[in-house]
Image: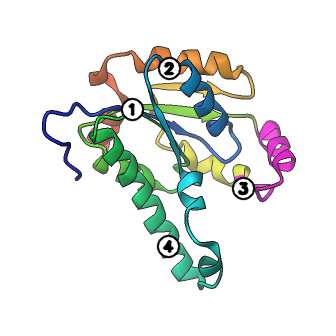
């Protein structure tokens, strides 16, 4: 576990969990405009984009999976380290593998994590994937079954049924709620 520097109150993490193309990055940008204090946006795609691709492209499947595992584990620790240094973070992620949530529960001990379920209809996900052109069409649908399987959130929003402004307002209301009742604490108790 990462320790906070002396006399520093850890920042808050608003963790947006949703499948690819569900609107997490757009929502994070909206939150940065709407929140009443400075937050950093750190997304899993941002961390992945820092990795050198030519070398990754040459890896066999097992080595590639290990590289991706290390990248995601490092992402969790980078967010935790920033928060423990007193920074507030909007984190966007995809809990499509159970270990990702379990690892975050461990490394984010002592941090106020607001867990937000970001949902989107299957039809809208498909439309967004086709429109973006930078994703394999069908990735989001393949992630739907596993990403929200843990089932406990502080709040849930639907980017296909609500505006980004309304989603942001709901998340901000939720983030002001009591820390003791957060989903992360309940999930830690279950796991």
Of helix, strand and loop, which one carries label 2? loop
Disc ID at residue 139: 3
Residue 177: give x, y in percent of width and height.
37, 16
Residue 185: give x, y in percent of width and height.
29, 34
Q: Nearer the viewer, mark 1 or mark 4?
A: 1
Say which residue label 2 marks. Answer: 35
Q: Do tag 1 and tag 2 residues touch (Cβ < 8 Å)?
A: yes
Q: Is 78 part of what is drawn in magenta?
A: no
Q: Which residues are magenta?
A: 122-139
Q: Nearer the viewer, mark 3 or mark 1?
A: 1
Q: Residue furthest front?
A: 38
Say which residue label 4 marks. Answer: 67
- Between marks 2 and 3, how big is the CA–CA gap? 31 Å
Mark nearer the N terminus (2 vs 3): 2
- The kind of secondary structure the magenta stretch mainly shows is helix
Of helix, strand and loop, which one carries label 1? loop
- Between marks 3 and 1, how big is the CA–CA gap? 30 Å
């Amino acid at each position: 576990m990462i320790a906070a520097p002396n006399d520093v109150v850890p920042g808050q993490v608003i963790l947006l969990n949703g499948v690819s193309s569900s609107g997490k990055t757009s929502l994070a940008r909206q939150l940065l405009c709407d929140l009443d204090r400075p937050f950093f946006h750190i997304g899993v795609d941002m961390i992945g984009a820092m990795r050198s691709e030519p070398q990754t492209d040459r890896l066999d499947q097992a080595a590639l999976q290990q590289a991706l595992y290390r990248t995601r584990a490092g992402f969790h620790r980078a967010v935790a380290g920033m928060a423990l240094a007193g920074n507030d973070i909007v984190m966007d992620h995809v809990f499509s593998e159970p270990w990702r949530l379990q690892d975050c529960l461990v490394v984010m001990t002592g941090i106020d994590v607001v867990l937000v379920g970001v949902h989107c209809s299957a039809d809208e996900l498909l439309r967004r994937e086709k429109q973006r052109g930078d994703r394999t069409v069908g990735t989001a649908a393949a992630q739907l079954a596993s990403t929200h399987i843990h089932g406990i959130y502080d709040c849930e929003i639907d980017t296909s049924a609500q505006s980004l402004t309304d989603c942001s307002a709901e998340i901000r209301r939720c983030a002001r709620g009591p820390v003791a009742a957060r989903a992360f604490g309940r999930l830690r108790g279950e796991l």
